[in-house]
Image (cartoon, helix red, strand yellow):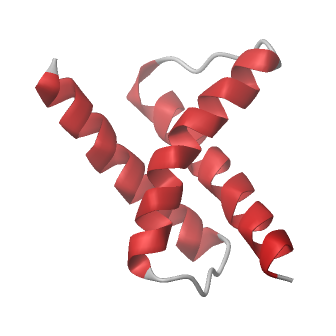
């Protein structure tokens, strides 16, 4: 169980990095990692509300990257 949690954190960190590159984020590396981890939860929550479920590793990566992109966008709005 702890191994699954660690793997999820690593995938979330990588997704945050990908979202930072995709969104051309000026945030630091650490903030992008945190946004990726939190973005996984946000993405799963938002897509769950819409009735969309992603299956498998690739689906979870897509969901996490989209959630992190949404969070990066929100951080940009707040900073303005």
Relative to 28, say whether 14 is above or below: above
Q: In this view, does 47 lie to the left or right of 37?
A: right
Q: Is residue 56 left or right of residue 42?
A: left
Q: In this view, does 29 lie to the left or right of 46?
A: left
Residue 29 seen in render: yes
Kindly identify the residue that appears in the image at 39 percent across and 29 percent down: 57
The image position of residue 61, as x and y in percent, is 48, 40
Q: In this view, does 33 lie to the left or right of 80?
A: left
Kindly identify the residue that appears in the image at 53 percent across and 58 percent down: 35
The image position of residue 68, as x and y in percent, is 60, 54
The image position of residue 3, as x and y in percent, is 12, 28
Relative to 65, say whether 51 is above or below: above
Relative to 44, say whether 31 is above or below: below
Point out the image quarter for the N terminus: top left
Kindly identify the residue that appears in the image at 85 percent across and 71 percent down: 77
Point out the image quarter for the C terminus: bottom right
């Amino acid at each position: 169980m702890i191994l699954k949690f660690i793997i999820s954190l690593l995938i979330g960190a990588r997704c945050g990095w990908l979202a930072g590159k995709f969104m051309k984020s000026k945030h630091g590396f650490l903030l992008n990692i945190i946004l990726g981890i939190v973005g996984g939860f946000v993405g799963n929550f938002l897509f769950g509300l819409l009735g969309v479920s992603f299956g498998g590793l690739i689906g979870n990566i897509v969901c996490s990257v989209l959630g992190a992109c949404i969070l990066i966008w929100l951080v940009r709005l707040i900073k303005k």
